[in-house]
Amino acid sequence: MLHTAHGRMRRAVDAYIDGELPPARAGVVEVHLGECWGCSGYAETVRLMKRSLRRLAQRRPSDLAVARLRRWAEAHMS
C-alpha cells in the first residue's frame, strides 16, 4: 500500500475503533486489519490506550504518568 493511502487507512482505523464508520467502509477496514500487521498492531495499541484512559477516570494517576501518556499520544496519534 502506498504511504499516503496507508495514512488514510490509519485514520479510518481510528474511526473504525470508535464505531464511526458506515458498515461498508468498516468492512474494508476489517479486511485490511486482517492483512496488515502494522495497522492491526496500531489498532490494538489504540484500543488498549482507550481502555486505559477510561480507567483513569476511576483513579487518580500520578502527574508523571499523565505527562508520559500525553507525550506518547501526541507523538503517535498525529
Image (cartoon, rainbow, N blue to C red):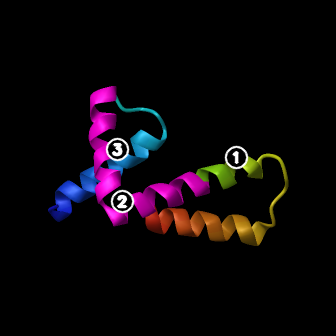
Task: Kindly report the distance in space between the C-alpha atoms of the residues bearing marks 3 and 1.
Answer: 24 Å
Mark 3 belongs to which amino acid? Glu
Question: What is the quadrant of the C terminus in the image?
Answer: bottom left
- Numbered disc 1: secondary structure: helix
Q: Does residue 42 belong to the magenta stretch? A: yes
User: Neighbour class for label 2 at 10 Å: few (<14), some, many (≥20)?
Assistant: some
Left/right of residue 64 with respect to residue 49 in the rendered view = right
Mark 1 belongs to which amino acid? Arg
Q: Does residue 43 belong to the magenta stretch? A: yes
Q: Which residues are magenta?
A: 23-49
Q: Main secondary structure of the magenta part?
A: helix
User: Neighbour class for label 1 at 10 Å: few (<14), some, many (≥20)?
Assistant: few
Residue 66 in view in this figure:
yes
Residue 78 in view in this figure:
no
**Residue at 42% from the left image edge and 47% from the top image edge:** 14
Work out whether residue 32 or residue 77 is closer to the camera in this orientation and state it.
32
Residue with the mark numbered 2:
39
**Residue at 47% from the left image edge and 43% from the top image edge:** 17
Tag count:
3
Task: Kindly report the distance in space between the C-alpha atoms of the residues bearing marks 1 and 2.
Answer: 22 Å
Q: Classify residue 30 by image quadrant.
A: top left
**Nearer the N terminus, badge 1 or badge 2?**
2
Picture coordinates of residue 23 (x, y %)? 33, 27
Residue with the mark numbered 1:
54
Residue found farthest to the left: 2
Residue with the mark numbered 3:
30
- Numbered disc 3: secondary structure: helix
Task: Kindly report the distance in space between the C-alpha atoms of the residues bearing marks 2 and 3.
Answer: 10 Å
